[in-house]
Image: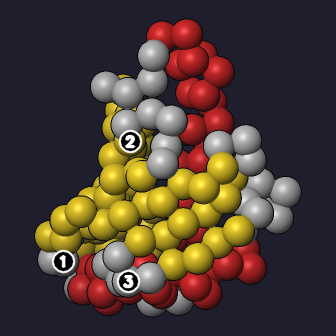
Amino acid sequence: MSQYESSVKCIPFPQERVYSKIQDLKNLEALKDKLPADKVKEFSCSSDDVTVNVPPLGNVTIRVVEREAPKCVKFEAVGSPFPTNMWIQVIPDGEEASKLRVVVKTEVNFMFRAMVEKPLKDGIEKIAEVLSMIQY
């Protein structure tokens, strides 16, 4: 398995507020308009999963598999061509701020690794960036 991490993002909101928002995926509905229309064709979510249609992959569902309040939410990809897990870590940075990082582990075979590595790293960084801009 290969592991990829976003840079650490500083968020001007307390850890508990950030965790409360990210642990319920229904809250991501507000981000729908920020997604690039040329990269994401469909988007739907519930409290425990998000489904996106990303050409050429098709429908991919990200499902919550574990919640560790108030510090981490763990996910798995369903319908992905490669086994993939992701987690969002939130740690306190004083009383009124926190830091966030997105980590992805995936099992991409050697032939495809060079092709997907850069888009995957860019995507993880974009997810962290969008999460850092939410008004928690």
Tell me residue 54's x, y (percent). 69, 52
CA gap between label 2 and label 1 equals: 23 Å
Q: Against 59, is 93 above or below?
A: below
Q: Which residue does the image show at 82% across and 64% down from the upper left?
A: 37
Q: Against 31, is 129 above or below?
A: above
Foreground residue among 53 and 97: 53
Q: Against 105, is 127 above or below?
A: below
Q: Against 108, is 90 above or below?
A: below
What is the secondary structure assignment of the residue under circle 3? Answer: loop
Any mark on residue 106, and which?
none
Q: Is there any visible trace of residue 12 in the rendered image? A: no
What is the secondary structure assignment of the residue under circle 1? Answer: loop
Tell me residue 99's x, y (percent). 35, 66
Q: Residue furthest top?
A: 111
CA gap between label 1 and label 3 equals: 17 Å
Q: Which residue does the image show at 64% across and 36% down from the upper left?
A: 119
Q: Which residue does the image show at 18% across and 77% down from the upper left?
A: 70
Which residue is the site of mark 3?
47
Q: Is residue 130 left or right of residue 85?
A: right
Any mark on residue 84, and which?
2
Q: Which residue does the image show at 45% across and 33% down from the upper left?
A: 82
Foreground residue among 98 and 2: 2
Foreground residue among 54 and 88: 54
Q: Is residue 76 left or right of residue 33?
A: left
The image quadrant of residue 56 is top right
Hey, what amino acid is under mark 1? Pro
Tell me residue 87's x, y (percent). 32, 56
CA gap between label 2 and label 3 equals: 20 Å
Which residue is the site of mark 1?
70
Q: Residue furthest left?
A: 68
Looking at the image, tell me whether mark 1 or mark 3 is earlier in sequence order: 3
Foreground residue among 91 and 70: 70
